[in-house]
């Protein structure tokens, strides 16, 4: 369980770090237009603001913390049920994003939809299952 928690928290934190980069740059893509098309699937003028992207980055960092806290690898402030509820909440959000992405992207034929079906949504689903397992099994199985 420790390895699963560390893998999951690391993945969430890395995706959060990528969002921090995206606040300032379209990396690894060359232009904002390419980024808008491949990563967000919106016209460039409708890209999320840096502030909103920062909120997503922060939430992904909190999600990573909740996972390692639920696994008993770091101290969790507050009552024990808080890390359980938080980790289950992260699992639910990731599951909704994963399933929703697959459903919506299956109806579209864009570059983003292809990437969403191949990478983005499956990653969300894997992380959702990992978070759910960590939430249910908790620190007693570490």
Image (spheres, helix red, strand yellow):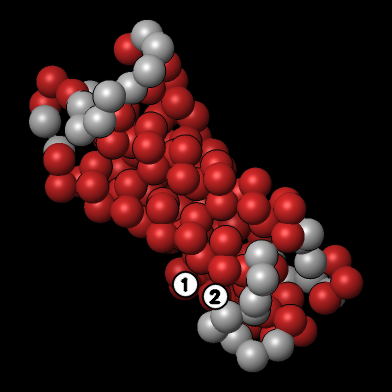
The label number, if any, that marks residue 115 in the structure image: 2
The answer to whether residue 13 is above or below residue 18 is: above
Residue density around tag 2, few if under 14, some if 14–19, many if 20 or more, within 10 Å: some
Residue density around tag 1, few if under 14, some if 14–19, many if 20 or more, within 10 Å: few
The answer to whether residue 32 is above or below residue 113 is: below
What residue is at 78 percent from the left and 59 percent from the top? 49
For the residue pair 121 and 90, the one nearer the viewer reads as 90
Give residue 30's position: percent from left, percent from top: 64, 90
Furthest toward the bottom, the residue is 30
The answer to whether residue 81 shows anywhere in this view is no
Question: Which residue position is annotated with label 1?
Answer: 118
Give residue 34's position: percent from left, percent from top: 70, 85
Which quadrant holds the N terminus? top left
The answer to whether residue 20 shows anywhere in this view is yes
Furthest toward the top, the residue is 79
What residue is at 21 percent from the left and 27 percent from the top? 72
For the residue pair 65 and 104, the one nearer the viewer reads as 65
| 53 lies left or right of 140 | right
Do labels 1 and 2 touch, CB within 8 Å?
yes
What residue is at 64 percent from the left and 53 percent from the top? 54
| 133 lies left or right of 123 | left
């Amino acid at each position: 369980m420790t390895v699963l928690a560390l893998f999951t928290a690391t993945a969430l934190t890395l995706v959060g770090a990528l969002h921090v980069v995206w606040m300032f740059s379209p990396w690894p893509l060359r232009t904002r237009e390419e980024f808008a098309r491949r990563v967000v699937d919106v016209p460039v003028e409708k890209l999320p603001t840096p502030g909103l992207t920062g909120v997503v980055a922060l939430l992904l960092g909190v999600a990573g913390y909740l996972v390692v806290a639920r696994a008993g690898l770091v101290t969790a402030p507050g009552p024990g049920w808080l890390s359980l509820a938080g980790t289950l909440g992260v699992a639910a959000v990731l599951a909704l994003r994963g399933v929703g992405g697959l459903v919506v992207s299956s109806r579209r034929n864009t570059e983003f939809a292809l990437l969403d079906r191949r990478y983005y949504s499956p990653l969300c689903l894997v992380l959702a299952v990992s978070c759910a397992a960590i939430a249910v099994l908790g620190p007693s199985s570490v």
